[in-house]
Image (cartoon, coloured by chain):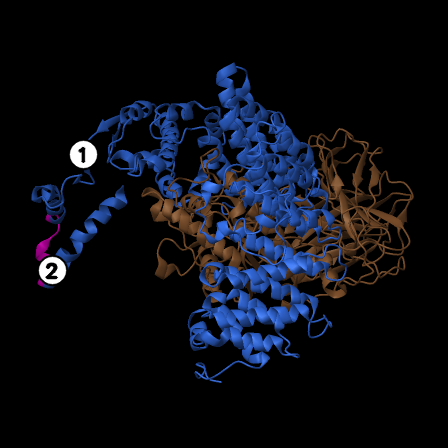
Amino acid sequence: MSGGCSIRAIWILNSLDSVVFSRRFPVVEKRWQAACKSENENASEESFSYAVYSLLPADSELASAFVERKQREGSARGFGIRVSQSSKGSDSWVDDPITRHIVGLYINKEEEGENNLLWPLILHIKGNYFIIVLPLVEPRYLKAYTRLCKRSDCGNAIGADDSLSSLLLDLPSITGAFMVAHAIGDIISADVAEPEVVVSASPSVGGLLDSLTGSIGISGISSRAKPVAAPVASSVPSNTAVAGAVAADAPKIGSRPLDKDALRTFISSSMPFGTPLDLSHSNIFTIKVNGFSSSDLPPPDLKQPAWKPYLYKGKQRMLFTVHETIHAAMYDRDEIPDNISVSGQINCRAELEGLPDVSFPLTGLNTAHVEGLSFHPCAQVPEHRADKQAVMFSPPLGNFVLMRYQATCSLGPPIKGFYQLSMVSEDKGAFLFKLHLMEGYKAPLTMEFCTVSMPFPRRRVVSFDGIPSIGTVSTTEHSVEWKIVTSGRGLSGRSIEATFPGTVKFAPWQTQRLPSSRSGFGIIADEDSDVETENCNNVVNIEEFLMDKMSNDLPPADLEEPFCWQAYEYAKVGASPF
Amino acid sequence: MTDIPPAAFKPVSPQDWETLIDDFQYGGLRRHKWTTLSPVLLDLALSSILKRDFPLKLHLLLFLEEFSDSFLLEPISLDRLLDSLRLVIQSPADGFHITLPLKDQFLVSTTSIFISLDVFNKFDIRYAESLVELLLIIVNRPNHGPDRQTRAVACECLRELERFYPCLLSDIAGHLWSLCQNERTHASQSYILLFTLVIHNIVALESNVSVLNTSVPLVPFNVPQSLLAGGSSNSTNTCLNYKELRRAMAFLLESPQVLTPCGMVEFMAMITPVAISLELQPSMLKVQFFGMVYSYNPILCHVVLMLYLRFMDAFDGQESEIARRLMLMSREAQHYLVFRLLALHWLMGFNELISSREVKKKKAMAVEMRLSFYPRVFDPLALKALKLDLLAFCSICIESLKSESASDAGKSVDKLFGDGLVSVSAFKWLPPGSTETAVAFRAFREFLIGGSSHSATDPSTIRTLLESTIFNTLQQYGRWSQYAYGGAFGGKGMTEDLGIVSKGYGPTILKWQEDGIFPLVQTDIGQIWKICLYVLVKMRTYFNQAQSALGGVALKYEMVSVEDVRNINCLADLLSYKVASLPMKYLGLLLGASFKAKNIWDGVVEKIEKSLAGWKRLYLSKGGRITLIKGTPSNLPIAKLRDL
């Protein structure tokens, strides 16, 4: 019965690398052992050397294997792609970024010799915790992976047999284990993954950046729209009948210390035998707290879905909000078009009695701009998606994301402009901001606040000089904050231009010698820089010199980042809502 | 309490139990010290759980479940376990001492212990029968309100038992079906999954039972004779009752609306083999489930992919739609990064799969999609790396299509490569240790060797490589070679070999090569081949440059195979090398000869004598002479090497 998803064990480690929580599923383990037994019996001579390690490690063994991998792979996640420190048999030898998420550990490395690889371990990092989930896969996949991370070639090869890609395609249990790991992560951090609950109070992260060289000017603006006043989200059991007066009945789970009872409850209910059945926290905790009374009658003619354990009773209404994140790369150059894309979602809350089907019209949708739509599992999308006029769905309880869309932007971003910073001396930079706010946006769209922050993660700000055309400025140790529009004085129905020229003085530059994780590279200093000087005629020599000096000890960016932020001077813009 | 508890120590208080559980989970010696307790552990735990005010009931049950293998189970303990279970189940839930979650967990843990310890086969069958009977009694109350969650849990327990002892419940399948039809609360998922598994096992074991027949009563439950006989009753299994099973399937296929995504995964895993065995129309499944590919839930997309893998013919013509969806999933910024990476991996695995079926089709598809593979500005670097892999894959497709249709595809390979690299072009000015550099060079390599056949037996490989468009494009990338030494090529094998060729430019290399030796062909031919190929190609470039720098002076190189290399002449020809054989002179020594042979050292002795002749021996004291004699011979080769 391949194709299912079962979990052999779950561990949670803290930042000190000790196991703080573990859960094993002996029933799944029994299946694994049976599979190993038959695999080893069928194994031919040639593959016998890859006999699989068939025991589940104790917490202490797992923790030490985790530490060992961390040392071997440079960090908890690992290198991801093969570098010169990668050793044969380790994850980065496989040369694929996904090995930062699907890891292998060698248990009791000294004693056991060859057959002690534990794979696939799903690694999810949440807060200070490392969540490790081990799904059940057939032993032959483990063998295939062992071969992959020990083959003596020069790295990932496209189209090779038994590639990591074909393994991942064959293994829904890995995908399922990621869902489990993320659900557990949400419980640890106590952020219930319901869309409207999280109203981001702090300005969201985005970047308006400009490279130091002046040759590459990538800039980005992202803004996050806060949903319109939606009631506090929670799943509604039927007894809270008063519309609007919804109590947050999903128990609040403190993130520290680890709420082991909540974890145990969640795991026991969501996957009693290690096979996940339902990963919705709100359903599980509501059932645990409220249970069912004999007045909770099932619908007379329909089957009540497993994802909707309670039926709503009370005043009927539906709420929708739209939440969009705009990624903008603005080059401020004629020959390079700006790149603006929108990731959006429509959140919904349907307080409807019974089990109704709801039709959501898509007639206003500008299909030319929308790259693709994807829907909540409750939506019934026909096989051919022939009908693009409407989508039919049967809403679950509480708040949910009805659909997500990726689109290009017909309108410019709500904040548009450029930012330049040039170093006039080693410790002094002159900068200029020129921004247009809400250009092309008409009432009733309102910008309630807009903050621009210039982070200087590697320099300490001593002082700054300059007055913006609008708004107020403050500094922190490593940033300059410019509040253009403050809450309560929203910008509605008109566009404004904001400029901010100034200078900022830093503490003397200190060469940050990072522990040379990539030692042994004979780096030859750049001699001919024809590539990047192309467009820097306006850049004085000192700046070039400074740039070289600074960029030479830039730490490598994480593979999770789009680029090395620190190599650019960038600003972050937070604006919302409108 | 000392580290090693006295033999008579028995955990009573919650704190004692917590210590014990921690020790068990920690493993090693800490667990070992409790060994003396194992015969009575279960009994002790049960009596604690049954205490009214004991606070760790659930925790202790989980402990019993996880470490059941460490008990020495006696029949009397089994009786005790079952009695305790009955007691808890039958007591009304008061919300404090006996809660519904406790009941649920007790059911799960007991079932789990029964399965782990194989109570069915190792103990009297009546234990197993009474557990199943208890579960069936709970299950047999469809639509009963307050205990619906417990009924769902009991279904899960039965499903787990049926999974380990296939056809355990097949005799009562008729009852289960009607329960399944009647249940309308949210517990219906568990009823459906249980019934699906029973059907699955009937089909898998080709058991000749009627799923409509309800003549065997639900309770009292008796384990079927076929199971007791140890599965040797194959002769009685004639054929499946297809008509009835198809009816059951038709019923099951109506139900997916009520399943959670996780439930759907389980359901599909069971239903697919049944559909194959019963020879159902795959299009039925397609109509019912293909829509899930439009869900943003990754696991549902994966379910559709699994369905595709099983019924490729039925999905014929839908490959590009699936590929498009996967690409879109990788773009959804709302997803966790890992799901975006997974989507790309599925796409790659999917491409490989189609390619094994219809080569041309997939190539055309990949080429068609190439525009969507370009990394975007705000894609995380990990995603960029995988998208560049896909582009490299496209370039292979284009190259091979080019050879078939002689179009101007070559140009678009250049473009593909150049445009793809824009996303990490910062590597040109970032320090060589940057991640952008690593990603860019990984892509260089993919583009370069991706098209080669990766096999040592194909002599055309190198020629193809040298003539490939990508290679020519790469040569135009100017300064990039400098970074090769930065280790960005990933992998020791690669950097070590490259280190040789990229230590310097032009004359330096040539000088080094004059009587240098390089690992042209290593012993582990099959896999090292790619590296060698790469090194070869690199060398060729450098030599070409160097030769022109030196004014066209032709240089001669020799290559020596250490092992048997099939195509060495072909290689030598390509690179304008001479094939030489061992032993050869290297650093003044005969390489390849036995180091025990006395005469091979003659040359060395001669050289050192010559070096020493110049010294004015008379000026040295006796001690000085000894020092010189001791020190010089060991240093001479090093001094010599330094000149190289």
Q: Residues within 10 Å of mark 2 (few under 14, many from 20)?
A: few
Q: How far apart in space, not on screen, are marks 1 and 2 (Cα)?
A: 37 Å
Q: Does residue A149 appear to the left or right of A498 in the view shown? A: left
Whether B122 is drawn above or below A179: the answer is below
Q: Which quarter of the picture shows residue B342?
A: top right
Residue at (38, 53) in percent of width and height:
A115
Q: Picture coordinates of residue A422 (x, y %)? A: 67, 47
Circle 1: residue type: Leu
Find the magenta span and give its range: B613-622
Q: Do labels 1 and 2 share a chain?
A: yes
Question: What residue did someone put label 2 on?
Answer: B626
Q: Picture coordinates of residue B121 (x, y %)? A: 46, 59
Q: Residue B582 bears which disc, if any?
A: 1
Which chain is rendered brown in the image?
A: A
Residue at (54, 70) in percent of width and height:
B79
Confirm whether residue B430 shows in the render: no
Labels 1, 2: front one: 1
Residue at (72, 31) in percent of width and height:
A334
Q: Does residue B525 appear to the left or right of B302 in the view shown? A: left
In this rendered view, identify the residue nearer to me: B150 or B420.
Answer: B150
Whether B504 is drawn above or below B619: the answer is above
Q: Picture coordinates of residue B595 (x, y %)? A: 14, 45
Q: Which quarter of the picture shows residue B218?
A: bottom right
Circle 2: residue type: Ile
Which chain is rendered blue in the image?
A: B
Residue B225 drawn in magenta: no
In this rendered view, identify the residue nearer to me: A79 or A58.
Answer: A58
Secondary element type, mark 2: helix
**Residue placed farthest to the top in the image?**
B406
In this rendered view, identify the residue nearer to me: B83 or A325.
Answer: B83
